Image (cartoon, helix red, strand yellow):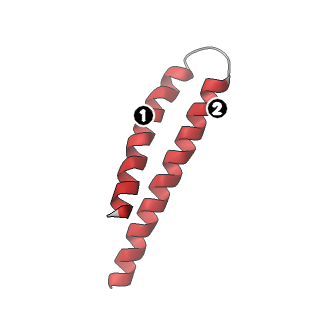
Amino acid sequence: MKAHLTLAIGILMAAIFAYRAANAFLEPGIGLLEAYVLGGLILAGWMMFSGSRELLERRRASR
């Protein structure tokens, strides 16, 4: 259950921060907002990676 929750929250965060990134990069210049969005995308990617890795480990262990 923990792996599914981590994966789902990661996907949700990735969608939200991808939308925010599209809006942030339309404005000229690079500033604090872009760093915040990039950090959110990195965190979302890490959550999706760890959730999927745990699901794959469980699948391998059940075989």
Question: Is residue 61 placed above or below 18 in the rendered structure?
Answer: below
Q: Is residue 3 above or below residue 12?
A: below
On the rendered structure, is 32 left or right of 7?
Answer: right
Sequence-earlier tag: 2 or 1: 1
Instruction: Give percent across and percent down for residue 24.
Output: 55, 22
Residue 28 in the image, given as x and y percentages of width and height: 63, 14
Q: Residue furthest bottom?
A: 63
Quarter of the figure that contains the C terminus:
bottom left
**Secondary structure beneath label 2:** helix
Residue placed furthest toward the top: 28
**Would you place residue 38 above or below residue 10 in this image?**
above
Q: Which residue is mark 2?
A: 35
> Is 29 displayed left or right of 11 in the figure?
right
Instruction: Please determine whether, in this image, residue 3 is positioned above or below residue 25.
Output: below
Task: Give, as a three-letter code, the residue at label 2.
Answer: Ala
Give how far across and how far down residue 2 sits, in percent: 37, 62
Quarter holding residue 14: top left
Label placed on residue 16: 1
